[in-house]
Amino acid sequence: MKRFKLYFISRRYFYILLVAILIILNSVVFTSSTNLKDVDLRYLSGLIIICIFCFFLLDFSRYKGTLLRFHKKMTEAHILDTQLLLKESDMVMMKEVIDLIIFNYEKELNVKDQGLEEIEMYLNQWIHEIKIPIAVSTMIADQLSGVQKEELLFELERIRHYTTTALYISKANHYESDLFIEEMDPVKIINEVIRDYKIFFIKKDISIEVANHLSHDKLMTDKKWFMYIVGQILHNSTKYMDPSGHISIELFSRDHQIHIGIKDNGIGISPSDIGRVFEKGFVGSNGRLHSKSTGMGLYLSKKMAELLHIRLSVSSEQYKYTTFTLVFAAIDSEIDLLKQHSNLNISQ
């Protein structure tokens, strides 16, 4: 009864208007015709009332059916108490459903955020603690000689690489607060990355060449993340290259922009995979056949490149070469772009 009352009140203006129109029509017919009898008028009025009542029942039935279907879907989704429809009016029910959905959503988000914070805290602690045994193991490995030393140092370097990747992934929730933008020499930073990954080049006897054609040797970016992006590309190249391969890194200016091209003569990327190499978790046919890839390194590199306004792209011809290209805006333009992010630390 309560729902019926609410329904009728919510539509009272519509029915008042409809009845008024029918009364006016009835009055016009009555005044314009002298041949109508009282029984005819009663019949016409009764017919009008019956039509209004039938329309009312049909509309209310459809309205109630819509609410019942809505209630059923909410109940099946475990969002709504099955007794709520019987206890509350329709409008109150809708408001409570919306409030309940928002409450459950916020509650679920809070639980997940708390869980992620705990995982991140543990992961960061573990990463910093694991650096000590890695360093000690490296010192012990240096005391060895021959193949054993090379193999152990190589595996330790792999551990260091994947540990570093895990550390950067753990920062996924607060990238921007971790950035520090400063002017730097890209050639110097690239050479530093090459030294960090030298064990991978030595293992496969890969030669690497850096050609600097820049008229000026400065750019604005975050050093740590720039090193991470270049390191991921170089590590990715070593995984998909045969022994005695070659990597060339070229730096040049074009259209007031700094271009850094990193090209290897490895197995290349298949045409079906080339458009997906930066997707999260995508390993491609090469990753499945030649190594146990996670598909996270290049995804994270692309994400950070976009945040730093670096255009990161890839081109390749299968079984011939792969080239990753980083494009930086001119230093003044880069400063303007980066300053749009007010929470970035920029050093000039």
Image: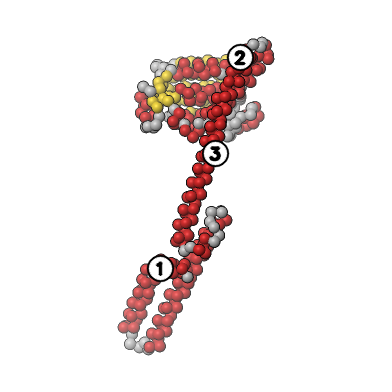
The residue carrying mark 3 is: 115
The residue carrying mark 1 is: 9
Mark 1 vs 3, N-terminal side: 1
Nearer to me, 277 or 213? 277
Residue 60 screen position, x and y as percent: 47, 68
Helix, strand or loop status at disc 1:
helix
- Res 204 → quadrant: top right
Say which amino acid is labelled 3. Gly
Residue at 37%, 32% (x, y): give it: 342
Residue 105, above or below 148: below
Tell me the crowding category of disc 1: few under 14, some 14 to 19, or many 20 or more residues within 10 angstroms, Cα based: few
How far apart are the two marked residues, 2 and 1, measured between alpha carbons? 84 Å
Residue at 50%, 17% (x, y): give it: 192
Q: Is residue 311 left or right of residue 21?
A: right
- Res 28 → quadrant: bottom left
Residue 43, above or below 245: below
**Of discs 2 and 1, which sits in the foreground?**
2
Residue at 62%, 32% (x, y): give it: 285
Say which amino acid is labelled 2. Met
